[in-house]
Image (spheres, coloured by chain):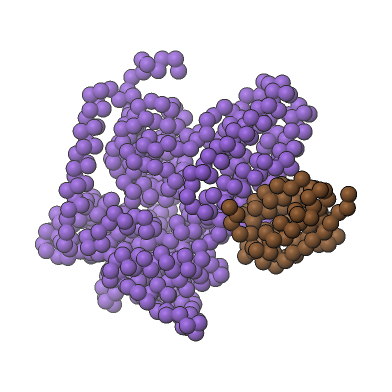
Amino acid sequence: MNKIWASVLMRHEVGLHARPSVKLTKLAKAFESKIDLGLSPDGPWIDAKSIVKVMATKAPKDSTIYFRAEGKDAKAALDALVTLVNEDFPDGP
Amino acid sequence: MDHKTHRLAHRIEGRPAAPGIACAQLVRLLAAKSEARESRSKAGEQQALADAIEASRRDLAELADKVADDDAEAILAFQIALLEDENLVAPAVAMIADGEAAYRAWCAAIDPEIATYEQADDPYFRARATDLRDLRDRVLRRLSGEADQAVPGGVIVAAEDMPPSAFLATDWRDGGLVLRRGSPSSHVAILARSRGVPMIVGVDVDRLESGVDAVLDGDAGALIVDPDPALRAEYDRRIAELAEARQAASSFSGPALTASGEQVKVMINVTGLAELRDIDPSKVDGIGLMRTEFLFQAREKLPSENEQHQIYRRMAEWAAGKPVTIRTLDAGGDKPIAGLTQPGDLNPFLGVRGVRLSLKRPDVFRVQLRALARAAVIGNLKVMIPMVTVPEELERCRALFRDIVDELRGEGWEAAMPPLGMMVEVPAAAIAVEDFNADFYSIGSNDLIQYVMAASRDEPELADLARPSRAVFHLIAHVVEHANSCNREASLCGDLAGEPAQVAALLDQGLRVFSVAPGALAPVRAAIARYSGKA
């Protein structure tokens, strides 16, 4: 199966902190595909479903986040994740 | 342990920290222990860890349903996400497979994560170490078979120590607090007094068991376990009397007067808006001390300018023209703030705290001064600076404040420069008070006593030394004299002002402005009314 990529600029005030990380990993887990996250287009890549790994990136405000997904719902997953970051991690329902 | 039913009432002596009486069930809070049993098979240990994690996850989810504020919810969601993360748990599972005990495997898995957060440059990340430690202990408690220790309401809680955030999160109605550590002037004791929660310290809590009936006598500083019916009845009578006295005391009105008719101002110390709800502003002479530390504690983010402005403004509105004295952030000492104060300060009371920290962190200080300058437009707001040691500190604050007022006006805000006073709590400032050009002086007796007496307020063994001596009164008189000579106000806002037995001695020094915990208003006014001049 093909891998697909996406990237988005994160403008969240305090960076990829606890609250945004929880939202991001929760959303990633809603998809079957394997989803990776990186801070550069060449990686290193970490599991976007792991809060431990995502928080460990300590991504600050204004970093570009890269996603890489592989699986049946890869496209839907990346669309949803990019929207989440783009809209500054709004409170979901 | 099998003879519970035959046990006799026994009295355990401690030291009084907050007055009042509680008759209730005793609940002993335990710190997480790592010496949990480890006699299980590998499969048994795996199951024990899996069960402990699942139980902790359920507890957190339940808590998250109950909390109402955003920050607490975010922290709980973060902790739940961590427990659901294979990356955190997998190393522990692997170690158990290699023969390690579950509790050691869990610590070995989570401790390096905690260390990573502790070492982060970003204060927001650093503050998360506390959440991970809390999570580690929660799972350890479950592993050792201890039930979760959410503090139930209406009980007497016995514990080693208690952080202010845990105190604030507990329902203390009809309950009380027994601690081994801390002292009558520790921060939790200040909170207990201001909320009328009886509290004693210096008790060997290891000897106490949960579930027994107990009487906590915060006046005498004693805990009576398994009181007999006669003693119990006597204390029930005293509780009823106290309730009546409170009722009667709250009916005072008008200015506080000494027996010779001299007027004395009695103001209150507060930590937030919640305490003002039950207080009638017409019965006090204003707010003598608003401690802003609690706006900054147990939060994910430091409070924004707007958030602070709203609170200061509502206080000024509550006071309806009476003075509202707001102390700028006094972090450090016994009031650490995650992501702001320096962890591992060797001697925090002599370290980077109060104005020393504020001047080193202008990013945080400026936000507070901006909020204060905007709130100063409404009402009678005064600002005081804690821990001032040399005149330059006060002058730097004044210059910064002036710049900020100009800056705000430039941005189109209404802003004003409020009177800028100082806390007198460092002996250097008390001795040479005439060198400080403050608009008013407020004596912080808790710190002044511990610095003059060289006795920590948190050392139970030195409680008899950490008292107001002649040397302390001498400094108080000196500060009051100086203030009178230049027609400025001197007040005293430490615990000393709220002790009825010390009121006459303070009046003897010339002090005429007291600021006390709301619970001490009536007894202090009564002590003032008994005063008929220097003996």
Percent across and percent down for residue B168 are 43, 48
Percent across and percent down for residue B99 are 76, 26
The N terminus of chain B is located in which quarter?
top left
Taking the spot 42% from the left edge, 38% from the top edge, the residue there is B179
Q: Which chain is purple?
A: B
Taking the spot 26% from the left edge, 52% from the top edge, the residue there is B520
- Residue B504 placement: quadrant: bottom left
Taking the spot 57% from the left edge, 33% from the top edge, the residue there is B141
Residue B515 vs residue A62, the one in the foreground = A62
Percent across and percent down for residue B337 are 53, 56
Residue A23 vs residue A43, the one in the foreground = A23
Q: Is residue B330 rendered to the left or right of residue B111? A: left
As displayed, is residue B135 above or below residue B284?
above
Residue B518 vs residue B534, the one in the foreground = B518
Residue B42 vs residue B107, the one in the foreground = B42
Q: In the rendered picture, chain A carries what hue? A: brown
Q: Is residue B191 visible?
A: yes
Taking the spot 65% from the left edge, 45% from the top edge, the residue there is B81
